[in-house]
């Protein structure tokens, strides 16, 4: 009788019919709808970092740019396999330049589909692009080409279609020179520089105070100021402590120039709100410098790492890249801030970097 009562209740409430309708509608979600309905709630429940969620959203954007955005049930193995290849097509100008990056976008799309597996008869397989040799990812910019890039900044100009997030008060050549100096002498990730607030540059000699971190005190002085910012891993793995880097005199020269031109700007480096704007600007000055195979922002980061390894050793280089631990032991027993300040005085740059 209990079983009969439950059956009657399901018929009365329509729950069984509702589940069938839900499963039917789930098959016809787009990738974005599937993410919003299934994957995003899962990530929020597991407390995924905001930056991680944005990577999934970016992969969805790429999917929408190169496909007809079909419903899940119509996504085929052929379409999934073609997806990373389409991302790399030069005519699309999507800023995806390596097989690894293209395969990551494919992985995100398949991950969204897997979260909806109960709505689909099966998840189509896909063939990722072959891995590229490691040497492809270890490009160091030679000194003569750094010199040529800096001189090529005269070709920098604002893209009229991407003016959002730019600062008209700063001439494009001056801004690009500052950007080059920044990524060599504070070799952070592109996304960190892209989002950095103007207030990240502290023009003071003493190590900054952080009332929200009472125990975070370092006895060090930087004659040309400090950069204070949070890396993507800060909130989860670095106890919430910001990364605080001493500023090289050449970088200070460029940042002070920007402050004089636009003291009230929001971003430290207002090159635009679109990541592809940054890459287009970088490619333009390299073309003016006669560089056939353009370097990436990651290549500048690696070049900066090499500069600091020569000037201060491997541990100082890791510190400047934000890869050194910033916990209790590092703070009280093995702080490298003073070592980084000393290393800055030994970093050698092309002479043209002094000519604003």
Image: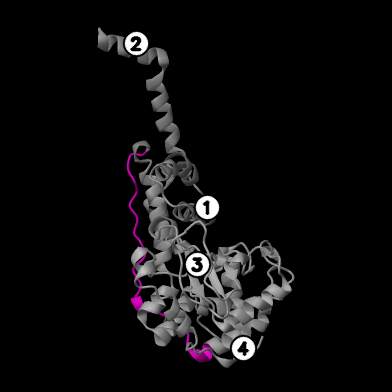
The local secondary structure at tag 1 comes to: helix
Q: Secondary structure at mark 2?
A: helix
Say the numbered circle drawn on residue 274.
Answer: none
Report if residue 163 is visible in the image: yes
Image quarter (top left, top right, bottom left or bottom right) of the C terminus = bottom right
Within 10 Å of the Cα at label 4, are there few (<14), some (14-19), or many (20+) other Cα atoms?
few
Q: CA distance from mark 3 to mark 2?
A: 58 Å
| C-alpha gap between disc 4 and disc 2 | 83 Å
Q: Residue furthest top?
A: 1
- Of badges 3 and 4, the one in the foreground is 4
Q: Secondary structure at mark 4?
A: helix
Tell me which numbered mark, 4 or 2, is placed earlier along the sequence: 2
Residue at 34%, 59% in the rendered image: 127
Residue position for label 3: 89
Residue range corresponding to the magenta coloring:
120-145
Residue with the mark numbered 4: 354
């Amino acid at each position: 009788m209990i079983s009969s009562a439950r059956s009657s209740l399901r018929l009365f409430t329509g729950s069984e019919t509702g589940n069938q309708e839900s499963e039917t509608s789930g098959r016809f979600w787009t990738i974005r709808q599937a993410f919003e309905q299934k994957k995003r709630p899962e990530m929020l429940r597991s407390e995924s970092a905001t930056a991680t969620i944005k990577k999934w959203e970016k992969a969805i954007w790429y999917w929408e740019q190169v496909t007809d955005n079909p419903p899940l049930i119509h996504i085929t193995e052929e379409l999934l396999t073609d997806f990373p290849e389409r991302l790399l097509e030069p005519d699309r100008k999507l800023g995806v330049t390596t097989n690894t990056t293209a395969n990551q976008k494919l992985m995100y799309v398949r991950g969204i589909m897997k979260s909806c597996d109960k709505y689909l008869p099966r998840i189509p397989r896909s063939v990722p692009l072959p891995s590229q040799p490691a040497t492809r990812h270890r490009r160091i910019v030679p000194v003569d080409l750094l010199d040529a890039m800096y001189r090529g900044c005269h070709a920098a100009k604002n893209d009229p279609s991407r003016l959002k997030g730019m600062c008209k008060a700063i001439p494009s050549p001056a801004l690009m020179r500052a950007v080059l100096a920044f990524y060599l002498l504070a070799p952070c990730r592109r996304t960190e520089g892209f989002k950095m607030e103007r207030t990240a540059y502290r023009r003071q000699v003493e190590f900054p105070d952080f009332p929200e971190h009472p125990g975070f005190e370092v006895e060090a002085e930087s004659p040309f100021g400090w950069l204070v910012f949070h890396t993507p891993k800060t909130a989860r793995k670095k106890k919430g402590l910001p990364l605080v880097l001493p500023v090289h005199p050449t970088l200070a020269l460029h940042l002070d120039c920007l402050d004089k031109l636009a003291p009230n700007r929001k971003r430290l480096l207002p090159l635009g709100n679109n990541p592809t704007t940054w890459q287009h600007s970088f490619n333009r000055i390299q073309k003016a410098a006669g560089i056939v195979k353009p370097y990436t922002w990651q290549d500048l980061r690696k070049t900066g790492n090499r500069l600091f390894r020569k000037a201060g050793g491997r541990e100082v280089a890791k510190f400047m890249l934000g890869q050194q631990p910033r916990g209790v032991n590092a703070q009280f027993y093995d702080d490298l801030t003073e070592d980084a300040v000393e290393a800055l005085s030994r970093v050698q740059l092309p002479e043209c970097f002094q000519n604003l």
